[in-house]
Image (spheres, rainbow, N blue to C red):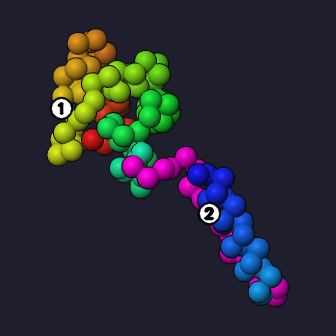
Amino acid sequence: MKIKLVAAALAAGLASAACSASEPAPAATVSAGTTAGATAGAATGKVSANTADESRIAAALKAAGVDNPERWAEEVVEYRPYAADDADLTSLRQNLAKYNPGEDTVDKIVSALTP
């Protein structure tokens, strides 16, 4: 999918350059790593706790400064699904509390996620 998007962007840029040699072609921008449904809050950098795969969740947790993000991503995936109307991910917070990670860690985890 990513390759197709990049190829399409390059083709569009080349076509534009061929049509108007005197003007520079606009820069093609492709959002790396975003797939439909994988991120509910792409504009905010958050990923969906319900649909993102474990590696994307781990990357988001790492970016949020969570220690041992792979382990916490595994827990996020384990406790799916999360209610779509629970923006604070209350059920996830309750499940993570079992591991006594500390309030700061839970806040960082939740800050990287959307339901």
- Mark with earlier residue (2, 1): 2
Q: Which residues are magenta?
A: 21-37
Residue at coordinates 56% horizontally, 55% vertically from top-left?
31
Residue behind mark 2: 29
Magenta span: chief secondary structure: loop
Magenta stretch: includes residue 34: yes
**Residue found at the far top of this picture:** 99
Side of 35 relative to 1 (left or right): left
x and y, in percent, of residue 62 in the image: 48, 30
Q: Which secondary structure lies at badge 1?
A: helix
Which numbered tag is attached to residue 82? none
Magenta stretch: includes residue 50: no
Task: Report if residue 75 is visible in the image.
Answer: yes
What is the quadrant of residue 93 in the picture? top left
x and y, in percent, of residue 66 in the image: 43, 26
x and y, in percent, of residue 79 in the image: 27, 24
Give the class, few, some or many, for how many residues have Cα within 10 Å of label 1's Cα (few <14, many ≥20): few
Instruction: Indicate the amino acid at tag 2.
Output: Thr
Q: In the figure, 112 relative to 68: above or below? A: below
Give the class, few, some or many, for how many residues have Cα within 10 Å of label 2's Cα (few <14, many ≥20): few
What is the quadrant of residue 20 in the picture? bottom right
95 or 103: nearer the eye? 95
Side of 66 relative to 86 (left or right): right
Q: Quadrant of the C terminus?
A: top left
Instruction: Indicate the amino acid at tag 1.
Output: Thr
Q: CA distance from mark 2 to mark 1?
A: 36 Å
Task: Report if residue 67 is visible in the image.
Answer: no
Residue behind mark 1: 90
Residue at coordinates 41% horizontally, 39% vertically from top-left?
52
Side of 35 relative to 92 (left or right): right
Residue at coordinates 68% horizontally, 69% vertically from top-left?
27
